[in-house]
């Protein structure tokens, strides 16, 4: 295991994708910083702080992690390095765990460095952070668990799909689907207001009409809402989206998010190892 990790980290530090991914995350955070500074100056806003910068790169992060994981593990498939590791006596679980550890470390490094450098600049410019220190600390620590869970989810198909081209395409599409489709849709469904109306409408001739408040037919209730809520919170991208909201408070049901992150990580890893042990490598 030690030799596998040593070899893996040696490859990681030489990987250009690690540094490009970190740069991409940092650029995303920098864009948010510049945007906040512009509107704070333009409108004289006082509630814009550096708090949301910590999680500003979460939309770019999954794709950056996916690219690194897909090509890092895909190269092992393409060069038959994965099979050679088994031939020389390394166990399949050890091989899987070593790749998982290296890819998780890379994901956490992208997240921490990409956001941290800009936060160090953004905090003084935007006037520090809003909210209490313990809330911010809990959000940061829990988001690290979500990043680790995301890495584990992407390592699963990258390891089990033997063809390098197919593996890379699958992992990238998975990250894009989770980031741009699944998580936004689930989030938008949950954000539908429970009621509609309850406001005064003014017409062009100056007359007004009170629109009565009534239940919103598109608001999910009962089992349907519980199912959508669970899917949103169980997916690592959904967890990161919750932390990325520009609010200096813990999300509703916060205790579930780190628990789901751990469960997702364990489930992805256990599934991957179980299948990998029985897989016939060509």
Image (cartoon, rainbow, N blue to C red):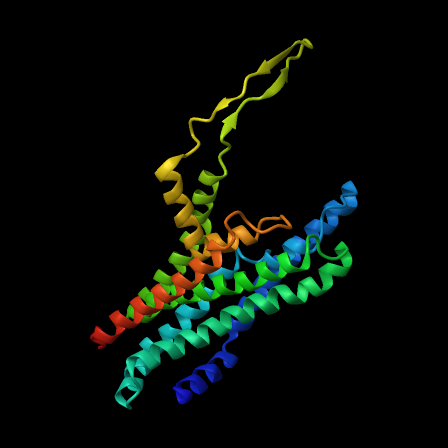
Return the x and y of residue 48 as percentages of the image width and height.
71, 48
**Picture quadrant where residue 45 is located:** top right
**Picture quadrant where residue 123 is located:** bottom right
Return the x and y of residue 47 as percentages of the image width and height.
73, 46
Of 222 and 199, nearer the camera is 222
Whether residue 277 is visible to the viewer of this picture, yes or no, is yes
Going 34% across and 81% down the picture, which residue do you hit?
A: 94
Going 43% across and 82% down the picture, which residue do you hit?
A: 8
Return the x and y of residue 228 as percentages of the image width and height.
39, 44
Of 126 and 166, nearer the camera is 126
The answer to whether 31 is drawn above or below residue 188 in the figure is below
The answer to whether 185 is drawn above or below residue 175 in the figure is above
Of 278 and 167, nearer the camera is 278
**Picture quadrant where residue 218 is located:** top left
Of 241 and 64, nearer the camera is 241
Q: Quadrant of the N terminus?
A: bottom left
Return the x and y of residue 182 as percentages of the image width and height.
41, 48
Q: Quadrant of the C terminus?
A: bottom left
In the image, taking residue 77 as reference, residue 145 lies left or right, namely right
In the image, taking residue 199 as reference, residue 5 lies left or right, namely left
Whether residue 163 is visible to the viewer of this picture, yes or no, is no
Number of marks drawn: 0
Going 32% across and 76% down the picture, which residue do you hit?
A: 77
């Amino acid at each position: 295991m030690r030799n596998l990790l040593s070899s893996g980290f040696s490859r990681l530090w030489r990987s250009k994708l690690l540094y490009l991914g970190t740069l991409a995350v940092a650029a995303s955070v920098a864009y948010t910083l510049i945007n906040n500074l512009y509107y704070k100056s333009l409108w004289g806003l006082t509630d814009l702080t550096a708090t949301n910068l910590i999680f500003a790169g979460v939309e770019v992060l999954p794709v950056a992690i996916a690219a690194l994981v897909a090509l890092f593990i895909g190269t092992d498939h393409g060069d038959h390095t994965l099979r050679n590791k088994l031939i020389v006596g390394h166990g399949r679980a050890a091989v899987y765990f070593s790749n998982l550890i290296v890819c998780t470390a890379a994901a956490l490094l992208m997240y921490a460095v990409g956001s941290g450098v800009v936060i160090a600049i953004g905090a003084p410019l935007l006037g520090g952070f809003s909210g209490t220190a313990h809330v911010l600390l809990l959000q940061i620590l829990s988001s690290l668990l979500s990043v680790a869970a995301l890495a584990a989810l992407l390592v699963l198909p990258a390891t089990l799909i033997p063809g390098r081209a197919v593996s890379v395409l699958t992992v990238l599409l998975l990250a894009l689907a989770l980031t741009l489709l699944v998580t936004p849709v689930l989030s938008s469904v949950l954000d539908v207001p429970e009621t509609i109306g309850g406001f005064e409408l003014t017409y062009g001739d100056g007359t007004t009409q009170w629109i009565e408040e009534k239940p919103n037919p598109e608001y999910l209730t009962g089992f349907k809402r519980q199912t959508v809520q669970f899917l949103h919170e169980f997916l690592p991208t959904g967890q990161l989206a919750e932390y990325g909201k520009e609010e200096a408070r813990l999300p509703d049901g916060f205790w579930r998010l780190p628990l789901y992150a751990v469960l997702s990580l364990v489930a992805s890893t256990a599934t991957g190892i179980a299948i990998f042990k029985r897989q016939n490598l060509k």
